[in-house]
């Protein structure tokens, strides 16, 4: 049974990657920024695919690498925003809210306000919270049971991702996530 479970989990990740790839390429061509596909695997946020931006600056994220803190990265904020309050409190109590950079949200009330914005906007914004000098917008991708299957993100340095671009890039991430979700069989 354990092998069947592992096989199904792996198949879900392969399906997400293969469905998302052409949409990721399209988004990369439009934005010239790094496009990331992430998911949750056994309580660990994992980068499962990436297209590097063409702006000449590498972000040093590798496929297969994990994000250690949910509160400090856009994809983590998406997953936290989709949890019910009790589960979210349990998760955050377990991992804490450590400062990864001086921009990381370390106050639970401020984080709850941020998660409310995620739900309202349909995307998460990360402003140098995990890595100094990097901004990211991330939007949720849903599977055929309308469950959260993963996230698509647009990442770049603060020099090419200015704050005034946040809403436009957020909208583009949401549009791309919606296309992938429908291809994954999300119920309408």
Image (cartoon, rainbow, N blue to C red):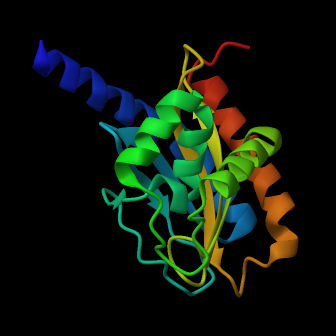
Residue 51, placed above or below residue 113: below
Residue under the point 72% across and 82% down: 160
Location of residue 103 in the rendering, given as x and y in whole percent from the top left corner: 61, 76
Residue under the point 75% across and 43% down: 116
Choose between 39 and 53: the one closer to the eye: 39
- On the rendered image, what quadrant is the N terminus found in? top left
Choose between 185 and 74: the one closer to the eye: 74
Location of residue 83 in the rendering, given as x and y in whole percent from the top left corner: 55, 31
Tell me: 35 left or right of 61.
Answer: right
Location of residue 134 in the rendering, given as x and y in whole percent from the top left corner: 59, 77
Residue under the point 51% across and 79% down: 101
- What count of labels does the image hold? 0
Location of residue 143 in the rendering, given as x and y in whole percent from the top left corner: 54, 23
In terms of image quadrants, where is residue 159?
bottom right
| Residue 18 visible in the displayed image | no
Residue under the point 53% across and 62% down: 72
In terms of image quadrants, where is residue 7?
top left
- On the rendered image, what quadrant is the C terminus found in? top right
Residue 102, placed above or below residue 139: below
Choose between 77 and 10: the one closer to the eye: 77
| Residue 23 visible in the displayed image | yes
Residue 2, placed above or below residue 33: above
């Amino acid at each position: 049974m354990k092998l069947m479970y592992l096989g199904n989990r792996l198949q879900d990740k392969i399906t997400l990657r293969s469905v998302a790839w052409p949409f990721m390429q399209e988004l990369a061509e439009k934005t010239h920024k790094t496009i990331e596909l992430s998911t949750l695997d056994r309580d660990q946020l994992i980068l499962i695919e990436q297209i590097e931006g063409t702006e000449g600056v590498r972000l040093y994220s590798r496929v297969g690498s994990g994000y250690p803190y949910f509160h400090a990265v856009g994809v983590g904020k998406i997953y936290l925003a989709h949890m019910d309050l009790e589960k979210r409190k349990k998760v955050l109590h377990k991992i804490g809210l450590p400062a990864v950079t001086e921009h990381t949200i370390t106050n639970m009330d401020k984080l709850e306000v941020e998660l409310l914005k995620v739900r309202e906007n349909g995307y998460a914004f990360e402003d140098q919270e995990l890595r100094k000098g990097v901004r990211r917008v991330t939007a949720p991708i849903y599977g055929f049971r309308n469950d959260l299957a993963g996230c698509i993100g647009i990442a770049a340095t603060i020099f090419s991702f200015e704050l005034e671009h946040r809403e436009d890039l957020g909208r583009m991430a949401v549009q791309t996530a919606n296309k992938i979700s429908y291809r994954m069989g999300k119920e309408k």
